[in-house]
Image (cartoon, rainbow, N blue to C red):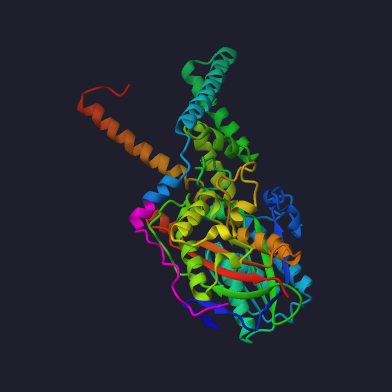
Amino acid sequence: MLRGKQTWWFEKRPVIIGAATVVGPDEGDGPLAADYDLVHPELDLQQKSWEKAERLLMEQASDFALKKAGVDKQELSFYVGGDLMNQIISSTFAARSIGAPYIGMFGACSTSMESLAIASLMVNSGAANSVLAGVCSHNCTAEKQFRYPTEYGSQKPPTAQYTVTGAGAVVVAPEGKGPVVECATIGKIVDLGIKDPFNMGAAMAPAAVDTIQTHFNDTGREPKDYDLIVTGDLATVGHGIAKDLLVRDGVPMNDTVFTDCGLLVYDVARQKVQAGGSGCGCSAVVTYGHLLKRLEQGEFRRILVVATGALLSPLSFQQGESIPGIAHAVAIERAQ
Amino acid sequence: MATKAGSKYKKMTMSPQEYQTYAKTREPSRAVLRNCLRAFLVGGLICTLGQVIQDLFVYAFGMSQQEAGNPTVAILILTSVILTCLGVYDKIAQWAGAGTAVPVTGFANSMCSAALEHRSEGLVLGVGGNMFKLAGSVIVYGTVAAFFIGIIYMAFGVEGH
């Protein structure tokens, strides 16, 4: 079960039996549009508040995932989820309508892989027959809570990132048809003192590096064992730093394809997203929408998703605290 | 495959200080000159527009320069609020930077955007309580600055106007 220092090896090979993603207009305008289950043409989803819109994304993604998995809401053992809102209201309110026993978690943008790791652990240990793992984020709720009102005219620096409007959910079960969750490396907080909330990529990059190195140390694997290693939302600045740090430490990252969900989700050069995408929804919609499909189509055999999180609060950065970073890695393999 | 857990890769050899310096070098540089130029252009354009409106009031309604001031500001504020409500002001601002932030239109945008954003929390706690969220500090430090300028004037025996 525990392998090395902080990696869980899932011997029972839990399976992702259903995955679904729902996104907003900017993601629908991006290069992965065809991979999502539903693209909303407007940001407010015809809801009265941004918060309601975000919740609806989560509910819809959950419904689609359960439907694809062929699991009834009543049969579902647990729902594990989180989001970026204070007191993780989007997930909690979505859990109210899902009705399954619920574990809420907060790992900022790393919650996508954190929840998948926990869901797989629960299934692997026999604690659950089916677990729904899902996360969501909304560009406007994040702007409102962490930055300025959405319509406020402030100029964003080129290091800033654009929070993804989207939700991704998967159903993990002991057996069934679908990709297998092989193992997960739970990251630790790495904080090298970056304080700029408009440069979260640089704040999170060392955490991603730490988790990736730990994953290889714990499992004895090498980058070449993966067809793709993808970080969550480091975007242009952070991803470049992470790659250079890994290579500098002697990790042969050139043996694999190393990219970032924040760079895949948008056409960074064309869409006005500064350095790229961010948010829980970023790694969730790219992994559950795009990457799982490519796994099933046979393009990849095995991938490592390293979801990164910046664990700051609006209060902490105003008080001049630095940004603690974290990253959780999950290895997903095509079913043999 | 999975061998005994070892430490084949040694971790992060950089100190926080070294990393911060290194990360700084990786930031794409902000286009300061371009931003200044755009701010000058757009800010100047808004002020010229204000002047045109003021002159219109003077020539069309026979107002004095001073009388024309208030309705001019009102029109600029109204324009800014309409553009904010249409969701365009923030897009112009990303291009123009300080050019749209410094004139009175920026102040109106800060209040209007906060009011819009917090409408969902009700008229009192939402709109009322949050409207000055961004504009509040402008008023506070504007008043504080005026106070000290007043003292300086007094100390040098200069009249305020």
> Is residue B60 something that shows in the picture?
yes
Question: Horizontal placement of B10 versus A58: left or right?
Answer: left
Q: In the image, is residue A109 above or below residue B86?
A: below
Whole-percent x, y for residue A127 in the image: 62, 86
Whole-percent x, y for residue A75 in the image: 74, 82
Task: State the image quarter where residue B13 is shown.
Answer: bottom left
Task: State the image quarter where residue A304 is shown.
Answer: bottom right
Question: Horizontal placement of B17 versus A31: left or right?
Answer: left
Question: In this view of the protein, which residue sits in the foreground, A26 or A148?
Answer: A26
Q: In the image, is residue A310 above or below residue B102?
A: below
| Residue at x 38%, y 52% (from the top left corner) | B20
Question: In this view of the protein, which residue sits in the foreground, A10 or A34?
Answer: A10
Tell whether position B103 is magenta. no
Report the residue that reaches farthest toward the bottom.
Answer: A126
Whole-percent x, y for residue A193 in the image: 38, 57
> Is residue A99 something that shows in the picture?
no
> Quarter holding the N terminus of chain A?
bottom right
> Quarter holding the C terminus of chain A?
bottom right
Q: What is the span of residues highlighted in magenta in the rendered image?
A: B1-20
Question: In this view of the protein, which residue sits in the foreground, B144 or A34?
Answer: A34
| Residue at x 74%, y 58% (from the top left corner) | A35
Task: State the image quarter where residue A78 is shown.
Answer: bottom right
Tell whether position B6 is magenta. yes
Whole-percent x, y for residue A93 in the image: 63, 68
Question: In this view of the protein, which residue sits in the foreground, A39 or A48?
Answer: A39
Main secondary structure of the magenta stretch: loop
Total number of numbered discs in the rendering: 0
